[in-house]
Image (cartoon, rainbow, N blue to C red):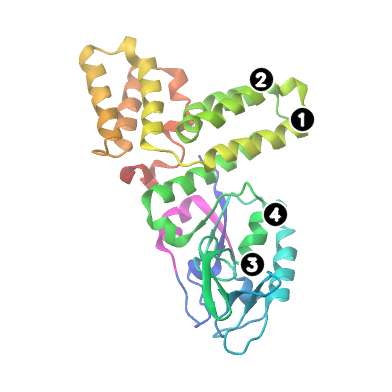
Amino acid sequence: MDKQLKIGVSSCLMGEEVRFNGGHCRNRFLTDKISEYAKFYPTCPEMAIGMGKPRESVRLEREADGRIHMRSPKSREDFTDRMEQFSHGWSENLHEMDLDGYVFKKDSPSCGVFRVKIYENGQPAERRGTGLFAKTVIKTLPQLPVEEEGRLNDPVLCEMFVERCFAYRRVKDLFQTGWSRKDVVDFHAREKLLLMAYSPGRYKSLGRLVADIKNLTRDEFKERYIKLFMDCMNDKPTKGRHANALMHMAGYLKSKLSSQGRAELAKSIDDYRAGFIPLIVPITLIGHMIRRFDELYLAQQTYLSPHPHQLALRNHT
Protein backbone atom coordinates (compact mmCIF):
# COMPACT_ATOMS: atom_id res chain seq x y z
CA MET A 1 0.00 0.00 0.00
CA ASP A 2 3.08 2.25 -0.15
CA LYS A 3 2.63 3.09 -3.84
CA GLN A 4 0.71 6.25 -4.72
CA LEU A 5 -2.30 6.05 -6.98
CA LYS A 6 -2.31 7.96 -10.25
CA ILE A 7 -5.66 9.71 -10.55
CA GLY A 8 -6.87 11.77 -13.49
CA VAL A 9 -9.18 14.56 -12.39
CA SER A 10 -11.14 17.51 -13.73
CA SER A 11 -9.02 20.59 -12.97
CA CYS A 12 -11.84 22.51 -11.28
CA LEU A 13 -12.09 19.80 -8.61
CA MET A 14 -8.52 20.58 -7.56
CA GLY A 15 -9.42 24.22 -6.94
CA GLU A 16 -8.25 25.57 -10.29
CA GLU A 17 -10.42 28.48 -11.43
CA VAL A 18 -11.34 27.11 -14.83
CA ARG A 19 -15.13 26.86 -14.64
CA PHE A 20 -17.29 28.65 -17.20
CA ASN A 21 -17.99 31.37 -14.60
CA GLY A 22 -14.31 31.73 -13.67
CA GLY A 23 -14.71 29.80 -10.43
CA HIS A 24 -13.83 26.32 -9.20
CA CYS A 25 -15.48 23.34 -7.52
CA ARG A 26 -12.75 22.19 -5.16
CA ASN A 27 -13.46 18.75 -3.73
CA ARG A 28 -12.15 18.38 -0.19
CA PHE A 29 -12.02 14.59 -0.28
CA LEU A 30 -9.59 14.77 -3.19
CA THR A 31 -7.47 17.72 -2.07
CA ASP A 32 -7.46 17.15 1.70
CA LYS A 33 -7.99 13.44 2.32
CA ILE A 34 -6.82 11.12 -0.44
CA SER A 35 -4.10 13.46 -1.75
CA GLU A 36 -1.55 11.82 0.58
CA TYR A 37 -2.06 8.56 -1.29
CA ALA A 38 -2.51 9.83 -4.84
CA LYS A 39 -0.79 11.88 -7.50
CA PHE A 40 -3.29 13.87 -9.53
CA TYR A 41 -3.28 14.56 -13.25
CA PRO A 42 -5.70 17.49 -13.74
CA THR A 43 -7.21 18.41 -17.10
CA CYS A 44 -9.85 20.90 -18.19
CA PRO A 45 -10.79 19.99 -21.77
CA GLU A 46 -12.84 23.16 -22.26
CA MET A 47 -9.85 25.35 -21.40
CA ALA A 48 -7.63 23.09 -23.50
CA ILE A 49 -9.62 23.80 -26.67
CA GLY A 50 -9.39 27.56 -26.10
CA MET A 51 -12.83 28.35 -24.71
CA GLY A 52 -11.29 30.64 -22.08
CA LYS A 53 -12.82 31.92 -18.84
CA PRO A 54 -15.32 33.18 -18.07
CA ARG A 55 -17.14 31.72 -21.05
CA GLU A 56 -20.56 30.90 -22.31
CA SER A 57 -22.09 27.78 -20.85
CA VAL A 58 -22.46 24.84 -23.22
CA ARG A 59 -24.72 21.82 -23.32
CA LEU A 60 -25.21 18.56 -25.18
CA GLU A 61 -27.76 18.61 -27.98
CA ARG A 62 -29.02 15.76 -30.12
CA GLU A 63 -29.32 16.59 -33.80
CA ALA A 64 -31.86 15.11 -36.21
CA ASP A 65 -29.26 12.58 -37.40
CA GLY A 66 -28.81 11.36 -33.82
CA ARG A 67 -25.33 12.81 -33.34
CA ILE A 68 -24.63 14.53 -30.03
CA HIS A 69 -23.18 18.06 -30.30
CA MET A 70 -21.65 20.30 -27.63
CA ARG A 71 -23.02 23.75 -28.34
CA SER A 72 -23.64 27.09 -26.66
CA PRO A 73 -27.39 27.68 -26.30
CA LYS A 74 -26.93 31.46 -26.70
CA SER A 75 -24.46 32.02 -29.52
CA ARG A 76 -25.10 28.56 -31.04
CA GLU A 77 -21.35 28.11 -31.47
CA ASP A 78 -20.54 24.43 -31.95
CA PHE A 79 -17.52 23.04 -30.07
CA THR A 80 -18.10 19.38 -30.94
CA ASP A 81 -15.31 18.84 -33.47
CA ARG A 82 -12.73 20.68 -31.38
CA MET A 83 -13.66 18.74 -28.25
CA GLU A 84 -13.64 15.37 -29.99
CA GLN A 85 -10.31 16.12 -31.68
CA PHE A 86 -8.73 17.13 -28.37
CA SER A 87 -10.25 14.17 -26.53
CA HIS A 88 -8.92 11.62 -29.00
CA GLY A 89 -5.47 13.24 -29.09
CA TRP A 90 -5.27 13.42 -25.30
CA SER A 91 -6.48 9.85 -24.86
CA GLU A 92 -3.63 8.56 -27.02
CA ASN A 93 -1.38 9.19 -24.00
CA LEU A 94 -3.58 7.33 -21.51
CA HIS A 95 -1.71 4.02 -21.66
CA GLU A 96 1.60 5.81 -21.07
CA MET A 97 0.11 7.78 -18.15
CA ASP A 98 -0.86 4.47 -16.48
CA LEU A 99 -3.74 6.00 -14.52
CA ASP A 100 -5.46 4.03 -11.76
CA GLY A 101 -8.69 6.01 -11.78
CA TYR A 102 -10.40 9.20 -12.90
CA VAL A 103 -12.72 11.65 -11.11
CA PHE A 104 -14.84 13.79 -13.44
CA LYS A 105 -16.98 16.89 -12.84
CA LYS A 106 -20.62 15.90 -12.63
CA ASP A 107 -23.21 17.32 -15.06
CA SER A 108 -20.49 18.74 -17.32
CA PRO A 109 -21.12 18.41 -21.09
CA SER A 110 -17.43 17.62 -21.48
CA CYS A 111 -16.66 15.69 -18.28
CA GLY A 112 -19.89 14.32 -16.82
CA VAL A 113 -20.12 10.53 -16.66
CA PHE A 114 -23.66 9.82 -15.45
CA ARG A 115 -26.97 11.54 -16.18
CA VAL A 116 -25.69 14.51 -18.20
CA LYS A 117 -28.61 16.40 -19.76
CA ILE A 118 -29.12 15.96 -23.49
CA TYR A 119 -31.31 18.59 -25.15
CA GLU A 120 -33.49 18.08 -28.20
CA ASN A 121 -35.44 20.86 -29.90
CA GLY A 122 -34.42 23.22 -27.10
CA GLN A 123 -35.78 21.03 -24.31
CA PRO A 124 -34.02 18.54 -22.00
CA ALA A 125 -35.07 15.24 -23.56
CA GLU A 126 -33.20 12.89 -21.26
CA ARG A 127 -30.60 12.75 -18.51
CA ARG A 128 -28.57 9.75 -19.57
CA GLY A 129 -25.72 11.41 -21.45
CA THR A 130 -21.96 11.31 -20.97
CA GLY A 131 -19.66 14.27 -21.60
CA LEU A 132 -17.67 14.12 -24.84
CA PHE A 133 -14.26 14.07 -23.16
CA ALA A 134 -15.27 11.55 -20.48
CA LYS A 135 -16.84 9.31 -23.12
CA THR A 136 -13.56 9.11 -25.05
CA VAL A 137 -11.51 8.36 -21.91
CA ILE A 138 -13.89 5.55 -20.92
CA LYS A 139 -13.88 4.10 -24.43
CA THR A 140 -10.07 4.17 -24.53
CA LEU A 141 -9.63 2.50 -21.12
CA PRO A 142 -12.84 0.58 -20.34
CA GLN A 143 -11.33 -1.03 -17.22
CA LEU A 144 -10.30 2.32 -15.69
CA PRO A 145 -12.29 3.09 -12.50
CA VAL A 146 -14.21 6.35 -13.04
CA GLU A 147 -16.42 8.41 -10.77
CA GLU A 148 -18.01 11.84 -10.43
CA GLU A 149 -17.14 14.07 -7.50
CA GLY A 150 -20.76 14.36 -6.37
CA ARG A 151 -21.06 10.62 -5.87
CA LEU A 152 -17.98 10.63 -3.63
CA ASN A 153 -20.25 12.11 -0.94
CA ASP A 154 -21.91 8.69 -0.71
CA PRO A 155 -19.72 6.64 1.70
CA VAL A 156 -20.45 3.35 -0.10
CA LEU A 157 -19.71 4.70 -3.59
CA CYS A 158 -16.63 6.52 -2.31
CA GLU A 159 -15.17 3.37 -0.76
CA MET A 160 -15.99 1.37 -3.87
CA PHE A 161 -14.18 3.84 -6.11
CA VAL A 162 -11.04 4.00 -3.95
CA GLU A 163 -11.10 0.22 -3.55
CA ARG A 164 -11.34 -0.22 -7.33
CA CYS A 165 -8.45 2.18 -7.92
CA PHE A 166 -6.13 0.27 -5.58
CA ALA A 167 -7.31 -3.03 -7.06
CA TYR A 168 -6.54 -1.80 -10.58
CA ARG A 169 -3.08 -0.73 -9.43
CA ARG A 170 -2.41 -4.14 -7.88
CA VAL A 171 -3.53 -6.20 -10.88
CA LYS A 172 -1.51 -4.03 -13.26
CA ASP A 173 1.56 -4.36 -11.05
CA LEU A 174 1.17 -8.15 -11.15
CA PHE A 175 1.69 -8.21 -14.91
CA GLN A 176 4.27 -5.44 -15.29
CA THR A 177 7.34 -7.67 -14.99
CA GLY A 178 8.23 -11.28 -15.79
CA TRP A 179 5.29 -12.82 -13.99
CA SER A 180 4.89 -16.56 -13.54
CA ARG A 181 1.92 -18.88 -13.05
CA LYS A 182 2.81 -19.04 -9.34
CA ASP A 183 2.68 -15.23 -9.14
CA VAL A 184 -0.84 -15.30 -10.58
CA VAL A 185 -2.01 -18.12 -8.29
CA ASP A 186 -0.62 -16.34 -5.21
CA PHE A 187 -2.18 -13.03 -6.25
CA HIS A 188 -5.53 -14.67 -6.93
CA ALA A 189 -5.45 -16.36 -3.52
CA ARG A 190 -4.76 -13.05 -1.74
CA GLU A 191 -7.61 -11.32 -3.56
CA LYS A 192 -10.11 -14.15 -2.97
CA LEU A 193 -12.28 -12.69 -0.23
CA LEU A 194 -12.33 -9.19 -1.70
CA LEU A 195 -13.49 -10.59 -5.03
CA MET A 196 -16.09 -12.77 -3.28
CA ALA A 197 -17.49 -9.68 -1.55
CA TYR A 198 -17.95 -7.99 -4.92
CA SER A 199 -19.07 -10.84 -7.18
CA PRO A 200 -18.94 -14.53 -6.20
CA GLY A 201 -19.93 -15.54 -9.72
CA ARG A 202 -17.18 -13.59 -11.46
CA TYR A 203 -14.70 -14.82 -8.84
CA LYS A 204 -15.49 -18.39 -9.89
CA SER A 205 -15.01 -17.42 -13.55
CA LEU A 206 -11.62 -15.96 -12.66
CA GLY A 207 -10.72 -19.22 -10.93
CA ARG A 208 -11.53 -21.17 -14.07
CA LEU A 209 -9.41 -18.76 -16.10
CA VAL A 210 -6.44 -19.26 -13.75
CA ALA A 211 -6.86 -23.03 -14.05
CA ASP A 212 -6.72 -22.67 -17.84
CA ILE A 213 -3.59 -20.49 -17.86
CA LYS A 214 -1.42 -23.10 -19.62
CA ASN A 215 -3.74 -23.13 -22.62
CA LEU A 216 -3.43 -19.38 -23.29
CA THR A 217 -0.62 -17.16 -24.48
CA ARG A 218 0.78 -14.77 -21.89
CA ASP A 219 -0.77 -11.75 -23.60
CA GLU A 220 -4.16 -13.48 -23.91
CA PHE A 221 -4.19 -14.50 -20.27
CA LYS A 222 -3.08 -11.06 -19.05
CA GLU A 223 -5.76 -9.26 -21.06
CA ARG A 224 -8.54 -11.63 -20.04
CA TYR A 225 -7.54 -11.73 -16.36
CA ILE A 226 -7.36 -7.95 -15.98
CA LYS A 227 -10.70 -7.48 -17.73
CA LEU A 228 -12.53 -10.11 -15.68
CA PHE A 229 -10.84 -8.94 -12.46
CA MET A 230 -12.04 -5.37 -13.01
CA ASP A 231 -15.47 -6.54 -14.19
CA CYS A 232 -15.73 -8.26 -10.82
CA MET A 233 -14.66 -5.09 -8.99
CA ASN A 234 -17.26 -3.09 -10.92
CA ASP A 235 -20.09 -5.08 -9.38
CA LYS A 236 -21.58 -3.52 -6.25
CA PRO A 237 -20.84 -5.42 -3.04
CA THR A 238 -23.82 -5.89 -0.74
CA LYS A 239 -23.95 -6.32 3.01
CA GLY A 240 -24.93 -9.93 2.36
CA ARG A 241 -21.85 -10.58 0.24
CA HIS A 242 -19.62 -8.85 2.77
CA ALA A 243 -21.20 -10.94 5.53
CA ASN A 244 -20.54 -14.11 3.54
CA ALA A 245 -16.87 -13.13 3.15
CA LEU A 246 -16.69 -12.46 6.89
CA MET A 247 -18.31 -15.82 7.65
CA HIS A 248 -15.75 -17.47 5.39
CA MET A 249 -12.99 -15.97 7.52
CA ALA A 250 -14.80 -16.98 10.69
CA GLY A 251 -14.79 -20.56 9.45
CA TYR A 252 -10.99 -20.59 9.44
CA LEU A 253 -10.93 -19.33 13.03
CA LYS A 254 -13.75 -21.48 14.41
CA SER A 255 -11.64 -24.33 15.78
CA LYS A 256 -9.33 -21.93 17.61
CA LEU A 257 -12.01 -19.84 19.28
CA SER A 258 -13.84 -20.49 22.52
CA SER A 259 -17.62 -20.75 22.42
CA GLN A 260 -17.73 -17.18 23.72
CA GLY A 261 -15.35 -16.01 21.00
CA ARG A 262 -17.39 -17.71 18.28
CA ALA A 263 -20.59 -16.15 19.61
CA GLU A 264 -18.99 -12.70 19.76
CA LEU A 265 -17.77 -12.95 16.18
CA ALA A 266 -21.10 -14.30 14.89
CA LYS A 267 -23.00 -11.47 16.60
CA SER A 268 -20.66 -8.89 15.11
CA ILE A 269 -21.24 -10.25 11.60
CA ASP A 270 -25.01 -10.47 12.14
CA ASP A 271 -25.11 -6.89 13.48
CA TYR A 272 -23.22 -5.69 10.41
CA ARG A 273 -25.56 -7.58 8.08
CA ALA A 274 -28.54 -5.96 9.82
CA GLY A 275 -27.01 -2.48 9.43
CA PHE A 276 -26.45 -1.85 13.16
CA ILE A 277 -22.67 -1.42 12.91
CA PRO A 278 -20.23 -0.46 10.13
CA LEU A 279 -18.00 -2.94 8.32
CA ILE A 280 -14.91 -1.82 10.22
CA VAL A 281 -16.22 -3.42 13.45
CA PRO A 282 -16.23 -7.10 12.38
CA ILE A 283 -13.11 -6.49 10.26
CA THR A 284 -11.25 -5.15 13.31
CA LEU A 285 -12.44 -8.04 15.48
CA ILE A 286 -11.34 -10.62 12.90
CA GLY A 287 -8.02 -8.84 12.47
CA HIS A 288 -7.40 -9.11 16.21
CA MET A 289 -8.19 -12.83 16.15
CA ILE A 290 -5.93 -13.41 13.14
CA ARG A 291 -3.00 -11.80 14.94
CA ARG A 292 -3.78 -13.69 18.14
CA PHE A 293 -3.77 -17.09 16.43
CA ASP A 294 -1.19 -16.25 13.75
CA GLU A 295 -3.53 -17.31 10.94
CA LEU A 296 -1.22 -16.70 7.98
CA TYR A 297 -3.68 -17.41 5.14
CA LEU A 298 -6.20 -14.89 6.45
CA ALA A 299 -3.50 -12.36 7.33
CA GLN A 300 -2.53 -12.23 3.65
CA GLN A 301 -6.05 -11.42 2.45
CA THR A 302 -6.32 -8.05 0.71
CA TYR A 303 -9.90 -7.87 1.97
CA LEU A 304 -8.67 -6.92 5.44
CA SER A 305 -6.96 -3.77 4.15
CA PRO A 306 -7.76 -2.95 0.51
CA HIS A 307 -6.89 0.73 1.03
CA PRO A 308 -5.07 2.77 3.72
CA HIS A 309 -6.91 2.49 7.03
CA GLN A 310 -6.19 6.18 7.67
CA LEU A 311 -8.87 7.03 5.11
CA ALA A 312 -11.44 5.43 7.45
CA LEU A 313 -13.64 4.52 4.48
CA ARG A 314 -15.11 1.46 6.19
CA ASN A 315 -16.18 3.44 9.24
CA HIS A 316 -19.40 4.49 7.50
CA THR A 317 -20.30 1.51 5.29
Marks 1 and 2 close (CB-CB < 8 Å): no
**As drawn, 300 above or below 120:** above
According to the image, label 3 marks what residue? 132
Real-space Cα distance between discs 2 and 4? 29 Å
Mark 2 or 3, nearer chain start = 3
Instruction: Specify whether residue 235 is painted magenta.
Output: no
Residue shown at 57% from the left, 89% from the top: 74
The magenta-colored residue range is 26-42
Mark 4 nearby-residue class (10 Å; few <14, some 14–19, many ≥20): some
- Quarter of the image where one finds residue 224: top right
Q: Is residue 39 magenta?
A: yes
Residue 20 visible here = yes
Rendered residue at 65%/37% (across/down): 226
Q: Residue 211 has which mark? A: 2
Do the CB atoms of the residues marked 2 and 3 lie less than 8 Å apart?
no
Which structural element holds mark 4?
helix
Query: Which of 182/39 is in front?
Result: 182
User: Height in image: 112 above or below 196?
Assistant: below
Q: CA gap, disc 1 to disc 2?
A: 14 Å
Task: List the single residue furthest toward the right.
Answer: 217
Labelled disc at residue 218: 1
